[in-house]
Image (cartoon, grey):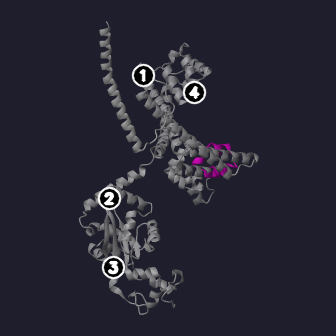
Amino acid sequence: MAVNDQEAVEWSEWSPALAVEVQFITILVSDSTAVCPDCHALQHKYCSAELWTALPICLQSILNKGLHVLFEHAVGYSLYHVTEFEDVGQMMPQVEAAVKDCGKFLKAVKLVAFRAFESAAESLENVNKISEGKMSDVLEAFLASNKFDTLGVADPTLGQNVKDVFSCNVLHTGIVPEIICGIRLFLPRYITGLTLCAMKQAELGLGHAYSRSKVKFNVNRVDNMIIQSIAINDQMDKDINTFAMRMREWYSYHFPELSRIVDNHYQYARVLKVIERKESLMDDSKLPELVQIVQDENKAEEIINAARMSMGTDINDADMANILMFAERVISLTSFRRNMTGYLSNTMNNVAPNLGAVVGDQVAARLISHAGSLTNLAKMPASTVQILGAEKALFRALKTRSNTPKYGLLYHASFIGKAASSDKGRISRFLANKCSIASRIDCFSESLSTKFGENLRQQVEDRLKFYESGDIPRKNLEVMADAQREHDAFTASEKKTKKRKRDDNLVCHGENGHDETLNGTPEEPQLKKKKKKKKKPEEDANQTLACVEELHRENDETSETPAKKKKKKKKQRESI
């Protein structure tokens, strides 16, 4: 295959023989190169003249000038030049053993430059940039101060940014991971003054700081509390059901008919505390309390009549005391469960109000918990959200080649129950689409409101009507435009109310400090305070001089008034 010296042939255009020969080429062995007879460039001894000419320009530059590797660490950035390294059989045990040999590795990989971080804050800032695949100013300046044609990096996203800025060849596969592994292993041998203990301490400190920075979000929008609260609610439901069944079974030895009359566990425990012993219901003295608990007079009378004709056995005082304590525990757990429901609703309103408005707080919290976080849920496509929670059924259907599930956690939404059996799959797919949109709005929007969620919920209801009656719903573009206008109006009103409250607080603080009269009665509050205009320094100087002159005049007048009074008194005495 004849190829010109200045042209580079794509890998797909190579002949099979050349492709096989390229796979077994040994790269970057400095002591095994020769001069190409055609272009007088460095040529590898295992590479023929025809193959050398057909190599891409990037590989020719690697063979000519070598490979540089960037290594990021908690102590700083370092750049290394690879002088000797074999790419043939790089995954073989012999090569891995050579990487672990300190003497061979230090000869093959040389330190070119090192830039230490000045503080822990700078180290954290740089590692945050690297985790996002971006270059910091420190890294860009460090790479700009060194010359290289081919750079090996660990992160392909970071490598793409380096390639765009410096217009160089970037590698992140092949021998690069092995070299980075060796550099990490022998880093204290390259940097003078860096001990293994200090390196471990720097890594540990940076790891803790990085973890803290990742969880330090807005305290009002932390979805971890949603995950914990919904898990507590599920556990509380199981525990309350278990305790209530044990309480019913225990108290049924004394009053078995009560378990049939009162179905609610919370009401049963409260009725048990009121009744205690069934003999106390022989009269109607406890009828008002029972009516207040069960909210039904007929049911309360039925309880009293059943107690008078009960077939239960007597129970001693110690057993009754334990039953009452257990009933009190069931009541407290049920009250705590209700408080947790209110807490979950408030948290969902702060974190994901639109998603909660579409499917309800309970289902929305379960979706976030199953996805791991609100961000993970926002990144999922609607098809994944639709079957979220039905993974076992999905893989079983794929294995047996049967029908895949139509819904997972979304089955508990009210829309699935309202839809007809033939429309459940379609409405589930449509609802998953709206949930995906709502989760992305909640995750990436700076100002939150329920306007988008309310409009998305209305779209689902309109789609249900369309399946039932055929009424064509509004287009999504029109609905989103209306939702955006409502959201903008809501945020503007919220800003005005916050500003008004801030002004009222300032006025109240001013009144508490200065508006008390001599009699102790406060004066009428001033609604607005005029802002003082900034005066020029010349006007301030003139004003201070005028104030000083006025003070002197007042002092003169006060000094003259007693003298005048004395003269008047003398004249009066002389006249007398």
Q: Is residue 410 magenta?
A: yes
Residue that lies at the very extreme toward the bottom in this rendered image? 37
Tell us which disc is closer to us: 4 or 3. 3
Tell us which disc is closer to us: 1 or 4. 1
Residue that lies at the very extreme toward the right in this rendered image? 470
Asked whether 227 or 398 is in front, the reply is: 227
Residue ID for mark 4: 260
Residue ID for mark 2: 203
Magenta stretch: helix, strand or loop mostly: helix
* Stretch in magenta: 406-433
Question: Looking at numbered disc 3 in the image, what kind of residue is underneath it?
Answer: Glu
Q: Residues within 10 Å of mark 4 (few under 14, many from 20)?
A: few
Residue located at (48% from left, 45% from top): 221
Residue located at (66% from left, 49% from top): 479
* CA separation in Å, label 1 and label 4: 70 Å
Q: Is residue 240 magenta?
A: no
Q: Residues within 10 Å of mark 2 (few under 14, many from 20)?
A: some
Residue ID for mark 1: 517
Residue located at (51% from left, 39% from top): 499
Question: Looking at numbered disc 2 in the image, what kind of residue is underneath it?
Answer: Glu
